[in-house]
Image (spheres, rainbow, N blue to C red):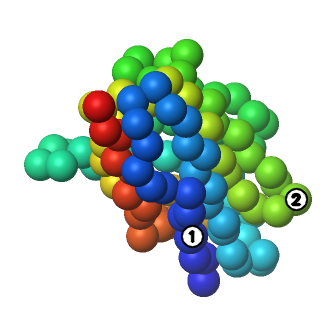
Amino acid sequence: QVQLVESGGGLVQAGGSLRLSCAVSGSSFNIATMRWYRQPPGKQRESVAEITSAGTTTYADSVKGRFTISRDNAKNMVYLQMNSLKPEDTAVYYCNVDACRGVCFRYWGQGTQVTVSL
């Protein structure tokens, strides 16, 4: 089985920074694309950023230039560096990966709360 555990969320003032981490367990799987999603209060979950196994990154327009996704394949970790945070970044942030062993399955973490105050 594959398990994802996010950490690093918290309360920060607007303009501040946070770094989210996601630890992926399940060494018998090949971890392909890794992603961060978020769900703001009262809204649908939305894609924030993704990084392929080759290191290609994609970002939502709302976070381009402020957020950076990275991964450490040796440690099965994915990170989200969030700078210049805005109140509208307030959400539960979820880690998501495609884990492959012949076929690929998508797994989700439990989420970590990020709150940005004025």
- Going 80% across and 51% down the picture, which residue do you hit? 72
In the picture, measured across the screen, residue 96 lies left or right of residue 37, that is right
Q: Residues within 10 Å of mark 2 (few under 14, many from 20)?
A: few
Of the numbered discs in the image, which one, if any, rests on residue 74? 2
Q: Residues within 10 Å of mark 1 (few under 14, many from 20)?
A: many
Q: Amino acid at mark 1?
A: Leu
Q: Amino acid at mark 2?
A: Ala
- Going 35% across and 40% down the picture, which residue do you hit? 116
- Going 58% across and 76% down the picture, which residue do you hit? 3
Of the numbered discs in the image, which one, if any, rests on residue 58? none
Can I make out residue 60 in this image?
Answer: no
Front residue of 110/7: it is 7
Whether residue 32 is situated above or below residue 51 in the rendered picture: below
Q: Quadrant of the N terminus?
A: bottom right
Cα distance in 3D space between marks 2 and 1? 15 Å
Front residue of 51/65: it is 65
Q: Secondary structure at mark 1?
A: strand
Whether residue 26 is situated above or below residue 76 in the rendered picture: below
**Mark 2 or 1 closer to N-term?**
1
Percent coordinates x, y for residue 4 in the rendering: 57, 70
Q: Quadrant of the C terminus?
A: top left
Q: Secondary structure at mark 2?
A: loop
Percent coordinates x, y for residue 62 in the rendering: 38, 21
Percent coordinates x, y for residue 34 in the rendering: 60, 49
- Going 12% across and 49% down the picture, which residue do you hit? 42
Front residue of 25/17: it is 17
Whether residue 44 is situated above or below residue 8 in the rendered picture: above
Q: Which residue is mark 1?
A: 4
